Image (cartoon, coloured by chain):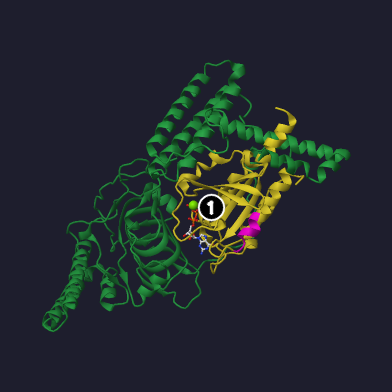
Chain colours: A green, B yellow
Amino acid sequence: MENEEEVALSSNPNSNLLVADPSLQKKRQSMLDRLSNRHQTRLDNSLTHRSAESDSSSSPSFESTSTFLSRFSNSKSSIESQLAQCQLCDPTQVKSHLDQISSSIFDLEKLVAENSYFLPSYEVRSSLKTTSDLRQSLEFLSAELLPKKKFSFRNKPTRKDPIAEPKGEEKEQEPEKKSGFRVPDSPGFRNKKGEILVHNFKGSEVGEFSISDLDSCEVRLMGSVRALFIHRLRNCRLYTGPVTGSVLVDGVEGCVFVMASHQIRIHNAKMSDFYLRVRSRPIIEDSCGVRFAPYCLTYKGIEEELREASLDEETEKWSNVDDFLWLRAVQSPNWSVLPENERLGLVDISSSIESQLAQYQLYDPTQVKSHLDQFSSSISDLEKLVAYNSYFLPSYEVRSSLKTMSDLRRSLKVLSTELLPKKKFSFRNKPTRKDPIIEPKEEQKEQEPEKKSGFQVPNSPCFWNKK
Amino acid sequence: MGLLSIIRKIKRKEKEIRILMVGLDNSGKTTIVLRINGEDTSVVSPTLGFNIKTIIYQKYTLNIWDVGGQKTIRSYWRNYFEQTDGLVWVVDSSDLRRLEDCKAELDNLLKEERLSGSSLLILANKQDIKGALAPEEIAKVLNLEAMDKTRHWQIVGCSAFTGEGLLEGFDWLVQDIASRIYVLD
Ligand SMILES: Nc1nc2c(ncn2[C@@H]2O[C@H](COP(=O)(O)OP(=O)(O)OP(=O)(O)O)[C@@H](O)[C@H]2O)c(=O)[nH]1
Ligand SMILES: [Mg+2]
């Protein structure tokens, strides 16, 4: 290896010329300096505290969580004690001491990075937090012990301009020059209240779709789409066919989502249910009271669309949720699996009876009771129909009809408890709620007490806006 | 250490280029890295910490750090700025609503002194999606022209879905870094 390099070096046709030309020679020298500097920094960083290993470029990967953890905690305590000692050490040595700690922390960060592929996710998160806390302590300490001069981690060997102007205040107040370019609106549904919104992507060019600022709406998307953006929904129901890229959900409350997608990211969701088919792990951030269940949607042609999108298989990923704000091995309190007896049955967005059912949610509250009664009697009719015909039907048809009806009954029951007052409160969506305005997310998040409906919504434990 | 041995050491190491990939969550960083490396991209989870990939690219060894972009993770980016030769900022060109966030995060990043020496490649990803903004439009929204004049930067439209544009982008980045660091090569 080394020999090869030497050959490569000496066989460089330029090297002879270099000796001759003084300006090139100068250039060469400066390159060597640069490289040596850069190289040295790398060595310093990766080796300072790893005397045992001879190879500087890769720290070992253990593939064992316990080995990792014991190593991690050893380094951590060693760094902590170094930090503590710093206060006592000779002022002339402070700088080098701090540099050393910085590279120990760097080592630790690298250790986490290189082992993160096999570690449980909460371990990755908590290790990240630890290293970041250590960095912060180091920065505080530096600010304290090295007054006046802003502490810089190390020299910047690859920097182009040696006399860089100090960046700082003047950078901060640089006026936001408007570029004059107006970002167009993407196709989608926005600013609606109490409507049923239907869209079929079939036949249209694959693209993205946005759904934002809806209150008490039902959205039905059929056909497949590449990307879906969902922003600020309240008391809505959203049903989608396959999304071949990702769904990004941000700022929703009291909603029900039935979605199939390759990736699903949920931010700022409260008290909402997600029925998902997804190829990778769904994630939540800044959310609480969210519940998960398997996908339960049907409409004409959905099977084929799901197959084409590679979403025909149930991967069980829907129950494998990652809460980015939860650092412990125990289950995050911010999400749960929706108990089976509270789940929706199969939702058919092409069938009229289901859409009727959905519409009840949007009706005038004073008429709800009579509508529900009517609905109940049409289910009775359906049950009779099945009963009268069951003597000649294949047995599986009977069973599946029975199941359909019991699902309908259950939906009706759920609806009744939700829509008719005085009944036991369910903290799912509150569809008859009046206030039409969806305030901007920022304000709403801070000061929205749960007092709208007069019900006391039980507080589930939450983690918000942690840093 | 004698000069020759230093040179030897350097020769071994010099082909190593360290690249940091950042950008908002969902922009496609992980998918891009997998695509460049010829790996399966059909199941990609949001990145919880980071992925590190070592890729041989032409005569260089790229050490690519793909760091998660979810809000919770962004505060950790700064831990990985050290020794970065190249910075790749990935943009979801179809996520029109968050372009302002995207600009703010990028502006923040570029204030970082430890990154001031690194070349910047902006990938306007997801060009395959109908409705995605073109790279020139992304450049305007991000106001790239207003960037510090000493910065080496380039914006390239690409799609991790089709692979289009990725090589062009990385070619530029590697060449730019190489010509900055290895002027003799
Ligand atoms: N249509 C299309 N989708 C893409 C493209 N690149 C990525 N995606 C999709 O976008 C989603 C997000 O991609 P990821 O690679 O996980 O994004 P990321 O930037 O790594 O996200 P974080 O790890 O959270 O920072 C996935 O569903 C990808 O399939 C692209 O070029 N075109
Ligand atoms: Mg990722």
Question: Which chain's residue wears label 1?
Answer: B
A147 above or below B31?
A: above
Q: Residue A314, percent across and down?
A: 33, 63
Q: Which quarter of the picture shows residue A150?
A: top right
* Of the pair A324 and A441, the residue shown nearer to us: A324
Is B173 situated left or right of A450 in this image? right
Instruction: Indicate yes or no whether the magenta region holds residue B116.
Output: no
Q: Residue A412, percent across and down?
A: 20, 68
Q: Residue A257, percent across and down?
A: 34, 62
Quadrant for the C terminus of chain A in the image: top left
Quadrant for the N terminus of chain A in the image: top right
Q: Which quarter of the picture shows residue B32?
A: bottom right
Instruction: Indicate yes or no whether the magenta region holds residue B169.
Output: yes
Is A36 situated left or right of A54 in this image? right
A276 above or below A129?
A: below
* Of the pair B6 and A420, the residue shown nearer to us: B6
Q: Residue at x 63, y 32 (%)?
A: A154
Q: Residue furthest front?
A: A3
Magenta range is: B164-170
Residue B151 visible in image? no
Q: Tag 1: Cα neighbours inside 10 Å, few (<14), some, or many (≥20)?
A: few
A333 above or below A298?
A: above
Q: Residue A449, percent across and down?
A: 32, 48
Residue A193 visible in image? yes
Secondary structure of residue under mark 1: helix
Is B95 situated left or right of B168 in this image? left
Q: Which quarter of the picture shows residue A163?
A: top right
Magenta stretch mostly in which secondary structure? helix
> For mark 1, what is the residue?
B101
Three-letter code for the amino acid on which mark 1 is drawn: Asp
Distance from mark 1 CB to nearest ligand 1 atom below 8 Å: no
Q: Residue at x 58, y 27 (%)?
A: A99
